[in-house]
Structure formats: C-alpha cells, structure tokens
Image (cartoon, rainbow, N blue to C red):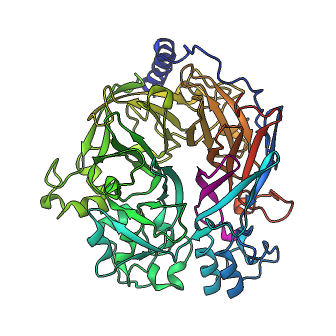
C-alpha cells in the first residue's frame, strides 16, 4: 500500500508536468465566451445567461396527422402498438441533420431503448404480448422533417420524409459477412439498441447497434451458450423478456438471429422507401458511433468504439475512394477493419499505438484460433481483437474528429470502467469511476498503422479526492463531471462533451449534479459547463443547424428507475429533443 500511494503521488505529479509541457493550455483564441452554468439537481434544462431552450419533440409525439397524441393513461392495445410506429420513438440518442433549404431540414434520430418502469402502468412487472410489440415499435430510428418558424423549428407532420424504422423493418445486409448473416434469407428484420451515429458525405445516416444482448434470452434449460454469445453478453434471461413472447429473440430456437444485430446500419433519409443496409465490413460489436473522415486521397475511414468494459477501439479503411457527389455502395463494403493497441508508460499519459489488421490468415486469425473465414472475424470482432492483442479500454464511447486540424486529431471518450483491476498506459486508473478522454492522431494519413495519443482530460473529483482521482489539471470545482459520453465538434472547433454518469450528487460525485453538456477548447484544454439536464437523465445526441445558431440536444430517460422527474410537461417523464438558441441570434457557445 505504501508503494501504491507513492505511485499515485508520482502519477499526479507526472500529470501536472504533462499538462505543462503539452500543446494543451496554449490556445491562440478564446472559444468559450459564454457564462458557465453551475451544477444543479433541478428537474429542468439549465442553459447559460442569454440563452433559451424549447422542446422540439418528445417520445410519443406524432410524426403523422393520423397518429394520436401521447396517452398519459398508458392503455396498451393493438391501436397503441400501431400508433407507436407513427410517433417519435423512446430514448432519443445520436442524431444528424440533413439540409433541405435555409429553413427546412431532416432530422434522423436514434431511439435507443425503452424504460418499462415508465412506459407501462404496471411498471414493466406484468408484460403482455402487446406490451412487447409496443416496445418493439418504440425503438429504432425516427426520421422527420423540421421547418424553422420564428426563432425555433417545428416538426412537419406527414412530410414525405417522415418514417419510423423499428424492430420489424426490412433491412438488407452487405459486405463480407452477408451470406453468413443471412443464410437462406434475403433480408433481416429490425434494428435494435441504436445508440450513436454517423453521417456520410454522400448524404446517408449511419445508425449504430449497441447492447443487443438486452433483447435476447432462451427458454430451453439445456441450451448452452458458445464462446461468441458469452463474449457479447447473452444470457438465459434478457433484460426485456422478449424471448417469452417472440421466438425470434429466443436464441435456443433461433441462434442465428443474434448475429443479425450489432452492426452499423446505413439509411438514406431522403427516400422513405429505401431499404436500410447493415454494413458487415465495419465489424460486429456494441457500436457507439461511427465517425467517418475522408483522407486526403479520398480514402474513407470510419472510427468506432465498442461500448463495454475492457473492449476495443476500431477503424475501418476503405478499399475504394470517395468522389464528391457520387454514392458508391462498395465504399463501406470493401476494406480492412483494424483494432487499436496502445503503448506507453503508465505515468506518462501519452504514447504511441498500432492499428492491427483483422484479416483472415494474418496475426493469428486462422482456423487454429477458431476463425474459418473473414466473415467469422467480422461477426466475432471482439474475439479477433483479443487474439491480436488489442488494448482493453474503459468503455469506448463516442469518437469525434477535429475539423480544424484537418481531421487528423480525433478524440474518444472513455466513460468509466468499474471492472478494471489493473491500469495500463491509456487507462491509468483501476476502478475508473469518473472516465477520461483521449486525443489520438496519425502522423501522415488516416491509413497509417501507427498512431500517437495523449490524455486530453481525466475527469475526477478535485474537492475530496487525491492522486489521479482528483482529475487532470483542467478539472476544477466549477466544471467537474463524470462519465464523458457524447462528443461532437462544432464548426468553430469547440468540442462538446455530453455525460451519462452518476447523478447522485453525493459522495464520490458530490457537487457534480445532474448529467450535463460541457464545451472544451481542444487547444487549451479549458472546460466549461454549458447545460444541465433534468433529474435522472442522460445528455446524448447533438446537431446544429447550418449557421450554428440552433443546437438540438437529446435528453434521454429522465426519471429512469422511477426517479422523481416530470420533465418535460409536468406529467410522465419523456425522452425529448431540446432546441437551444442564443437570445441575440448568435452562434451557440459564444
């Protein structure tokens, strides 16, 4: 213990020295000029002085005129099941905006999952088949037109772009694992646990499937889980109990069904009749987001994180080049998937790394190690990452590319990891309850197989903790937070950080308040709290209109676990998208 305390002291000294010598804390311009918001536990949206917030849409609000308004009585029957497929889905998450004109746009929004304790009168304790169908129609993706009317936007009901993609939607499969996933079928049905997102330069939306195991279980006591199913978290009883009412989600009867989920799905938001496509070349794991960048020679690179404790960071490098204005479906179907290995001294907070190719016949990915084909590797990307020696991370969340750096710099949020027992260079704390953000970059191009990295912020508690748990030098009493999740850069180079962490405001988390959204200067490391959400929510998903005068921010699961929230309307707590504007019409963040 004495030695460990000495190491902690040395580490915090190294962290101070690191920030003193880093490129951080040397900004040439002031990016964060808004008045910082204080942490709080109020059941409302708190924004800076000179700003205002308004609800755009909430779970259950109609997308079509024939849909009924949200039913506070929560009477679930076949009509309610149908109505759910005509309304905005539950638990808004990642989103993107697609321009139509100066005043009109399309929003594509993930609806990640459901909260049965809020959704039903019985709080999820007495589920019926109609309840399950209602849940299945309440998640997936919502796509709808918005139009600016006055200072804010409104939903355009019955727009030709409006549609819902649910657990029952017909979806195509492409890429190297297509045959293995489809078998004798032509399509799969549904997308699940759509967490974060991406956007392509050819105008499509990427929605990412994350905690797919929550929806699968099995009723056969003799059924044995194989190594792949275990690694992806599948177990006998699912979180939601769908296997009791829908055989498709009973993996003892339909073991192949599990491999149909865990992918990045590409959607054309401009054509409601188009069929979404699951892109298997991007690998199967618990995807957070898909950050797509175009290298200087036109190569498309997609960065992705696997959001589970001790899983990996990935990138996909396309074989084909992007040509402006040309949609080439092969771009996301042919290429190489890589996984990251981080190197460095544990107390340096920076180092080098290597991208290791996940290709059949290379790096031990062969029949001797349980892989019969490239399709096997992609379906079991986690197992392949372990074989090649990838670095287990503290739950990779969002990845954001810094446009002002020519997209060379990328930032990845590592939200927390209570399961870690041994620290490593890139994850310097065992039992990482606060999380951190790493900046990484390649020297020449995104195709480089070597990369460099450094810790941008180590979230922590500067007021009652010691050593590394105090946090990095840019964490203070005013801006302290935990569990960074959503990341996005705006057009001026601000890095927006959204949190999904402990909102108890007690003990280790005293003074952090409800989950929030902060803005960071990527050059100086300065951090300021911009927004605080209502009780028990997660802040997730961010989009800006063309001139960045309106921000669309997702408020997920207010009142989860029956916490005392009535956001947004003083009744049932409902996931919502909030619009933020500056009263003087200025750019968000100034």
Which corner quadrant of the image does residue 140 belong to?
Answer: bottom right
Count of marks, rendered view: 0
Chain part drawn in magenta: 90-117
Q: Toward the viewer: 570 or 468?
A: 570
Residue 166's spot in the image, x, y percent?
Answer: 55, 72
Q: Is residue 294 above or below residue 44?
A: above
Which corner quadrant of the image does residue 189 belong to?
Answer: bottom left
Q: Residue at x 45, y 60 (%)?
A: 266
- Quadrant the N terminus occupies: top left
Residue 329's spot in the image, x, y percent?
Answer: 35, 58
Q: Residue at x 60, y 58 (%)?
A: 109
Q: Residue at x 32, y 65 (%)?
A: 228
Q: Is residue 579 above or below residue 264?
A: above
Q: Residue at x 48, y 24 (%)?
A: 8
Residue 516's spot in the image, x, y percent?
Answer: 69, 41
Q: Toward the viewer: 9 or 286?
A: 286
Which corner quadrant of the image does residue 447 belong to?
Answer: top left
Is 101 a magenta residue? yes
Q: Is residue 562 above or below residue 507?
A: below
Query: Is residue 128 something one can see in this rendering?
Result: no
Query: Is residue 58 something one can see in this rendering?
Result: yes
Residue 279 placement, left or right of 561: left
- Quadrant the C terminus occupies: top right
Is 390 a magenta residue? no
Residue 138 placement, left or right of 270: right
Residue 237 placement, left or right of 558: left
Residue 454's spot in the image, x, y percent?
Answer: 43, 26
């Amino acid at each position: 213990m004495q030695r460990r305390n000495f190491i902690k002291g040395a580490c915090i000294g190294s962290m101070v020295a690191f920030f003193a010598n880093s490129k951080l804390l040397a900004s040439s311009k002031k990016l964060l000029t808004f008045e910082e918001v204080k942490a709080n536990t109020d059941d409302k949206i708190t924004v800076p002085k000179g700003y205002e917030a308004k609800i755009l849409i909430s779970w259950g609000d109609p997308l079509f005129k024939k849909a009924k308004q949200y039913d506070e009585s929560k009477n679930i029957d076949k009509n309610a099941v149908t109505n759910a497929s005509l309304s905005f889905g539950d638990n808004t998450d990642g989103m993107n905006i697609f321009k139509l004109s100066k005043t009109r746009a399309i929003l594509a929004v993930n609806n990640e999952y459901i909260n049965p304790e809020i959704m039903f009168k019985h709080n999820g304790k007495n589920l019926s088949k109609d309840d399950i169908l209602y849940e299945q129609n309440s998640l997936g993706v919502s796509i709808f037109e918005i139009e600016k009317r006055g200072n804010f936007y409104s939903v355009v009901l019955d727009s030709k772009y409006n549609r819902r993609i649910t657990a029952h939607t017909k979806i195509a499969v492409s890429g190297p694992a297509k045959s293995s996933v489809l078998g004798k079928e032509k399509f799969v049905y549904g997308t699940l646990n759509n967490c974060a997102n991406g956007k392509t330069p050819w105008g499509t939306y990427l929605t990412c499937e994350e905690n797919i195991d929550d929806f699968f279980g099995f009723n056969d006591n003799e059924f044995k889980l194989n190594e792949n199913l275990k690694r992806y978290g599948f177990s006998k009883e699912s979180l939601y109990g769908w296997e009791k009412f829908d055989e498709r989600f009973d993996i003892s009867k339909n073991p192949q069904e599990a491999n149909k989920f865990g992918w990045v799905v590409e959607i054309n938001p401009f054509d409601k009749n188009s069929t979404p496509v699951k892109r298997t070349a991007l690998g199967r794991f618990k995807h957070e987001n898909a950050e797509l960048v175009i290298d200087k020679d036109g190569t498309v690179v997609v960065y992705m994180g696997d959001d589970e404790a001790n899983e990996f960071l990935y990138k996909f490098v396309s074989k084909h080049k992007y040509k402006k204005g040309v949609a080439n479906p092969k771009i996301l179907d042919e290429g190489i998937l890589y996984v990251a290995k981080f190197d460095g001294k544990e107390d340096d907070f920076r180092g080098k790394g290597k991208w290791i190719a996940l290709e059949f016949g290379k790096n031990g990915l062969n029949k001797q190690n349980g892989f019969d084909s490239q399709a096997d590797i992609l379906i079991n990307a986690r197992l392949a990452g372990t074989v090649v020696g990838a670095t287990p991370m503290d739950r990779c969340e969002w990845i954001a590319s810094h446009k002002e750096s020519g997209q060379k710099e990328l930032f990845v949020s590592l939200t927390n990891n209570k399961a870690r027992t041994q620290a490593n260079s890139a994850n310097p704390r065992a039992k990482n309850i606060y999380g951190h953000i790493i900046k990484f970059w390649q020297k020449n191009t995104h195709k480089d197989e070597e990369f460099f990295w450094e810790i941008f912020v180590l979230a922590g508690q500067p007021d009652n903790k010691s050593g590394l748990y105090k946090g990095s030098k840019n964490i203070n009493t005013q801006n302290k937070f935990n569990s960074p999740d959503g990341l996005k850069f705006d057009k001026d180079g601000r890095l927006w950080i959204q949190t999904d962490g402990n909102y108890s405001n007690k003990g280790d988390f005293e003074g952090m308040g409800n989950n929030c959204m902060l803005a960071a200067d990527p050059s100086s490391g300065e951090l300021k709290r911009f927004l605080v959400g209502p009780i028990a929510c997660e802040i997730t998903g961010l989009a800006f209109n063309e001139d960045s005068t309106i921000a669309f921010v997702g408020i997920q699961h207010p009142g989860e676990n029956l916490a005392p929230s009535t956001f947004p309307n003083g009744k049932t707590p409902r996931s919502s998208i909030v619009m933020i504007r500056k009263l003087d019409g200025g750019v968000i963040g100034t």
